[in-house]
Image (cartoon, helix red, strand yellow):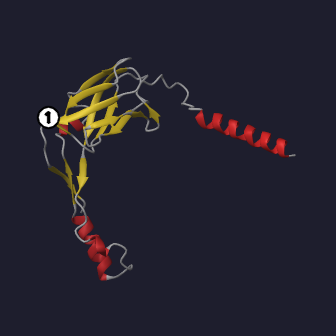
Amino acid sequence: MTRTFFSLITLLLVVSFLIGCRSATPEGMPRLYPVSIEITQEGNPLEEATVTLVSDDPELGRWVPTGITNASGVAVLQTNGLYSGAPLGTYKVVIAKRVTEPHPNPELAGAERGTPEEARYDQLNRERKTFTYVEPQYSSIADTPLTIEVVAGQRTYSVDAGKRVQEIVRSLQ
């Protein structure tokens, strides 16, 4: 009885391991290659920016590599947000960094419905501004001058996102 029990447990663990290690990809997805991209701005790393590679090739159009830069300005790309790497090909590089200013009075959060505190919190929330830190051309698919070609054997790419800006994109009102 004990031997059968341990054999069954071992079999279940092996099957679970094999199922867990299986990395099924969607039908038609091309082979992905490890890619990281370093984004600088005026020679400095650009932190917390979203980097997206956009292909003009209709075959690659549905496979979108993206990543978010770390403190060193490096984004490790994932295709469709789930699969490590990017397909081979030529891409436009789109970079965006937007930050909404913090709420000026966060202690009002969670105020009871219908109270003046809730109304004040909502009003202050609507007055917050969102800023962009990248020149508009770099965050536009149509206008970005940045391109890279993902090739086998090259894992790291570097691009410069122009000069640093801080422009109001929108007010939340």
Residue 13 x, y percent position in the rendering: 69, 40
Q: Is residue 157 above or below residue 48?
A: above
Q: Residue at x 19, y 35 (%)?
A: 40
Q: Is residue 141 visible?
A: no
Residue 168 x, y percent position in the rendering: 16, 52
Q: Amino acid at mark 1?
A: Gly
Instruction: Give the image quarter of residue 171.
Output: bottom left
Q: Is residue 42 visible?
A: yes
Q: Which quarter shows the C terminus?
A: bottom left
In this view, which residue lies farthest toward the right? 1
Please rate how many residues cluster around mark 1, counting C-alpha atoms within 10 Å: few if below 14, some from 14 to 19, many from 20.
few
Q: Is residue 68 above or below residue 114?
A: above
Residue 101 x, y percent position in the rendering: 22, 59
Instruction: Give the image quarter of residue 87.
Output: top left
Residue 35 x, y percent position in the rendering: 36, 28
Front residue of 57 and 19: 19
In this view, which residue lies farthest toward the top? 152
The residue where tag 1 is placed is 43
Q: Residue at x 37, y 33 (%)?
A: 77
> SS of the residue at dot 1?
loop
Picture mark count: 1
Instruction: Give the image quarter of residue 118.
Output: bottom left
Q: Residue at x 25, y 65 (%)?
A: 103
Left/right of residue 46 with respect to residue 150 in the rendered view: left
Q: Is residue 55 above or below residue 99?
A: above
Front residue of 93 and 56: 93
In this view, which residue lies farthest toward the bottom? 115
Front residue of 108 and 143: 108
Front residue of 106 and 117: 106
